[in-house]
Image (tube, grey):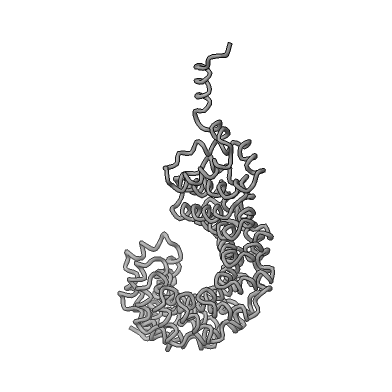
């Protein structure tokens, strides 16, 4: 065989390998092909091609493996069991930027599925190699490495700590400052994934100077970047008062409030989440948000949003109201009760209704004035219906019941309470009757209205255990009226009158 023929054979072999990996990589983009590729043993065929002498074949083989591993945890496990990861990690330090991006993609695709698979990536020494990639000149390599590190860190505090121990955080903060938008997004996302697990991990991110750089981007025109920035700041702020104060000290208010009207719903949701995480800690932080116009902005946000997007806003109003009477009144003045009432009525999801019920309870529990503001919005019957419905979650029932009790124990606006006399079960009814027993002895006008509205008649129809709190409340109410009035509205009184007529002997 001549030298030319030998070269042709090698050329054909190279073309075949190239065509094979390119075809597999293309087929792996379509879910319907995955099972067939797996059954054909494509993993074992791709593995030796990672060591191919031709760089493009190596890169395409890694890309194909990444796409397969990305599809499900079974294929990701096959990558681990096939001893492919150590080769990828070794190549991260040796190969060109194209291969590094592909290798980091495979590591990310494996790590994303579960803590166990992420730990397998860590165990093969990937962290040090990925951190070195964060120092590469090429932004695409940095992005791929940051993405893989974020996917490892998101699963647990232990894995996040491994990422921190490898020295990733300062380099991720540097990546946030790069001009490349895509790299900024992924780095901010990775910092969020690290921060979310514990105050200590969040503090590590803060100590690296992340807050100042993230805060500078809250008004960036790129929606995808803002999503990640707000997520990272929220994950930092949620852990403690000190961390929340550090976020606030970066002067994000009032600028951040404009993002509650952002066209991107995920920006709006993450922004509302950040504000909620700050507000929940102390009355002082909530007051700062109120002073910046945050309550009015959040009430508008809750009114304009739907579904899970509005949930952090609903909860933020509850946290603010819980802190003090004045803060709860700020929500009332901003028409927050009507907004929460609309959520309670219109949201199909139980957990969102439950959040609205809880927030309404936090607003109404402070004083008679607060309770009246909630009651006048006709919230009480809706809370009662949510509590009594058999087809709702236990969480919604519990939160509706607690909210009802909180509001009822302060409410002296009797007109709003009367409808509950007809519908409330005994465990709620005693709180309703208790309020009437507090007000009626001291208010002649209310006593008259209570009779003409049918309230006194309903009280006589209630069967209360002798000696119970409910029986005592009823006695207190009855003692507000002449005996004959009480008798007149008691069940069976008309029959007794008719019987007396039958037995009455006229005076002739």
**Residue 428: percent from the left, percent from the top?**
49, 48
- From where the camera sits, is residue 302 visible? yes
**Residue 47: percent from the left, percent from the top?**
34, 77
**Residue 250: percent from the left, percent from the top?**
63, 81
301 over 389 or under it: above or below? below
Residue at far top of view: 508
**Residue 492: percent from the left, percent from the top?**
49, 28
**Numbered disc total:** 0
* Viewer-side residue, 123 vs 242: 242
Give the quarter of the image for residue 311.
bottom right
461 over 38 or under it: above or below? above
Identified at 39% across, 79% down, the residue is 158
38 over 176 or under it: above or below? above
Residue at far front of view: 508
Judged left or right of residue 83, residue 161 is: right
Give the quarter of the image for residue 292.
bottom right
Judged left or right of residue 107, residue 508 is: right
Residue at far left of view: 81
* Viewer-side residue, 197 vs 105: 197
State the quadrant of the N terminus.
bottom left
State the quadrant of the C terminus.
top right
- From where the camera sits, is residue 96 visible? no
* Viewer-side residue, 2 vs 454: 454
Identified at 42% across, 43% down, the residue is 466
């Amino acid at each position: 065989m001549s030298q030319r023929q030998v070269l042709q054979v090698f050329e054909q072999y190279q073309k075949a390998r190239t065509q094979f990996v390119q075809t597999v990589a293309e087929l792996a983009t379509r879910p319907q092909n995955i099972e067939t590729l797996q059954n054909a043993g494509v993993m074992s065929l791709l593995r030796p091609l990672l060591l191919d002498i031709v760089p493009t074949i190596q890169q395409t083989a890694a890309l194909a493996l990444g796409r397969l591993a990305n599809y499900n945890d079974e294929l990701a496990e096959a990558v681990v069991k096939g001893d492919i990861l150590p080769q990828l990690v070794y190549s991260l330090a040796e190969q060109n930027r194209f291969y590094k991006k592909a290798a980091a993609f495979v590591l990310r695709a494996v790590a994303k599925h579960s803590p166990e698979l992420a730990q397998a990536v860590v165990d093969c020494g990937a962290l040090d190699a990925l951190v070195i990639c964060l120092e590469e000149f090429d932004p695409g390599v940095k992005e791929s490495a940051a993405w893989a590190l974020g996917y490892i860190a998101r699963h647990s505090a232990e894995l996040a700590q491994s990422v921190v121990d490898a020295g990733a955080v300062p380099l991720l903060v540097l990546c946030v400052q790069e001009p490349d938008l895509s790299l900024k997004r992924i780095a901010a996302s990775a910092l969020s994934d690290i921060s979310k697990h514990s105050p200590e991990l969040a503090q590590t991110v803060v100590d690296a100077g992340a807050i100042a750089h993230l805060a500078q981007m809250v008004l960036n025109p790129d929606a995808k970047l803002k999503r990640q920035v707000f997520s990272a700041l929220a994950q930092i702020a949620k852990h403690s008062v000190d961390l929340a104060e550090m976020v606030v000290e970066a002067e994000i208010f009032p600028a951040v409030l404009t993002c509650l009207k952002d066209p991107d719903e995920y920006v709006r949701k993450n922004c509302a989440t950040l504000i909620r995480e700050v507000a929940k800690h102390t009355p002082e932080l909530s007051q700062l948000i109120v002073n910046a116009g945050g309550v009015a902005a959040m009430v508008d946000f809750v009114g304009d949003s739907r579904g899970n997007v509005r949930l952090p806003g609903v909860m933020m109003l509850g946290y603010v109201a819980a802190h003090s009477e004045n803060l709860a009144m700020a929500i009332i003045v901003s028409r927050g009760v009507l907004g929460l009432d609309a959520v309670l009525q219109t949201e199909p999801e139980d957990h969102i209704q439950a959040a609205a019920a809880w927030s309404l309870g936090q607003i109404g529990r402070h004083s008679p004035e607060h309770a009246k503001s909630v009651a006048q919005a006709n919230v009480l019957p809706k809370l009662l219906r949510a509590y009594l419905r058999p087809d709702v979650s236990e969480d919604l029932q519990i939160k509706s019941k607690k909210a009802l009790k909180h509001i009822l124990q302060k409410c002296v606006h009797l007109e709003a309470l009367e409808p509950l006399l007809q519908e409330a079960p005994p465990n709620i009814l005693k709180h309703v009757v208790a309020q009437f027993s507090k007000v009626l002895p001291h208010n002649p006008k209310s006593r008259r209205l209570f009779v003409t509205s049918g309230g006194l008649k309903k009280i006589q129809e209630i069967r209360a255990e002798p000696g119970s709190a409910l029986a005592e409340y009823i006695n207190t109410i009855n003692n507000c009226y002449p005996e004959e009035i009480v008798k007149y509205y008691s069940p069976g009184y008309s029959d007794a009158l008719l019987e007396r007529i039958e037995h009455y002997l006229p005076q002739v």
